[in-house]
Amino acid sequence: MKLPRIQGDSDVRPASFDTKAISADALRELALPARRAFGKRVLTLGGLLMLTGCSLTDEKSVNAFLMSVSRMNDRVQGWLFDPTRLAPTYSEAELTRPFPFNAYYGIDDVPEVDGSDYRLKLSGMIAGKRDWTLPELYALPHAEQITRHICVEGWSAIGHWGGTPFGDFLRRVGADTSAKYVGFKCADDYYESIDMPTALHPQTLLAFEYDGKTLPPKYGFPMKLRIPTKLGYKNPKHIVEIFVTNTYPGGYWSDQGYNWFGGS
Ligand SMILES: Nc1nc2c(c(=O)[nH]1)N[C@H]1C(S)=C(S)[C@@H](COP(=O)(O)O)O[C@H]1N2
Ligand SMILES: [Mo]
């Protein structure tokens, strides 16, 4: 792997690395398009391992495997993307505790966003452009999900997020849903963008809560986009601006070589 390693809080990583569980979930959540790409025959984990030339012996090889599966997805994304396919959900008992923190910096450098004067900015192809305060956002229809977050660094974790369905929010503010991309600017230097079908996916959540409480700073206060059908880096934290555009906006990691699609 030539890609840069993302700095993270290694203390909260699980000590033992359950490659079987991770790859099984990764296959379910990431590899379905790749599995269907080969003459509609479903590939087994073994078949995918042969195609990608990977073994799952340690953290590094699982990482390489996830990346190559994700690259296969990139090639077949256009005609295989199914916006109605749902990511698996889990029970409270399956939650990963503590949930890992990750960012391109260490936990001491997490941005401190002041909620009282926070305003979410909307720009681009949105008819109802205006700033939103947190109380206004918290009053939107509420949804919760327990899903698995998969990071290309080779770890995954099950978390519980609450917020408002992102597609409903986009429609409410008059976003042009025929546009190609939705982009995000964050309170750190992070930025990300997603395709419109993913933005409108029923499980894509504008999340204000983690585990039933206000999203703590380390997990993205005041809000993150939770996309269970995408890899971790496609889930921007500390969002301060959302824009709709037909011009490819890229993303912090995609611009450094990770595939932009980053999921199913
Ligand atoms: N603003 C911002 N969002 C970000 C990142 C970041 O560095 N800054 N890192 C991404 C990556 S690579 C991962 S794995 C997840 C980690 O989210 P967590 O801290 O809730 O586990 O956030 C994603 N979103
Ligand atoms: Mo990540």
Image: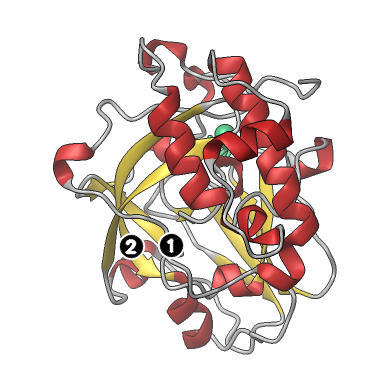
Query: Which one is nearer the viewer's eye here, 208 or 112?
Result: 208
- How many discs mark residues in the rendered view? 2
x, y (%) of residue 129? 60, 81
Q: Is residue 46 above or below residue 178?
A: above
For residue 24, side relative to residue 142 (left or right): right
For residue 236, side relative to residue 166 (left or right): right
Query: Which one is nearer the viewer's eye here, 239 or 155?
Result: 155
Q: How is the image coloured?
A: secondary structure
For residue 74, side relative to residue 232 (left or right): right
Q: Residues within 10 Å of mark 2 (few under 14, many from 20)?
A: many
CB of mark 1 near ligand 1 (< 8 Å): no
Amino acid tagged 2: Gly
Amino acid tagged 1: Leu
Residue drawn at x 44%, y 81% as measured from the top left: 168
Query: Which one is nearer the viewer's eye here, 19 or 113?
Result: 19
Q: Residues within 10 Å of mark 1 (few under 14, many from 20)?
A: many
Of the residues under marks 1 and 2, which one precedes in the sequence? 2
Q: Which mark is residue 82?
A: none
Residue drawn at x 31%, y 42% as measured from the top left: 159
Q: Is residue 46 above or below residue 72?
A: above
Residue position for label 2: 163
Cβ atoms at labels 1 and 2 below 8 Å apart: yes
Residue position for label 1: 206
For residue 205, side relative to residue 234 (left or right): left
Hey, which quadrant is residue 58 in on the image? top right
Residue drawn at x 36%, y 17% as measured from the top left: 14
Hey, which quadrant is residue 207 in on the image? bottom left
Secondary structure under tag 2 reads strand
CB of mark 2 near ligand 1 (< 8 Å): no
x, y (%) of residue 93? 14, 39
Residue drawn at x 46%, y 64% as measured from the top left: 204
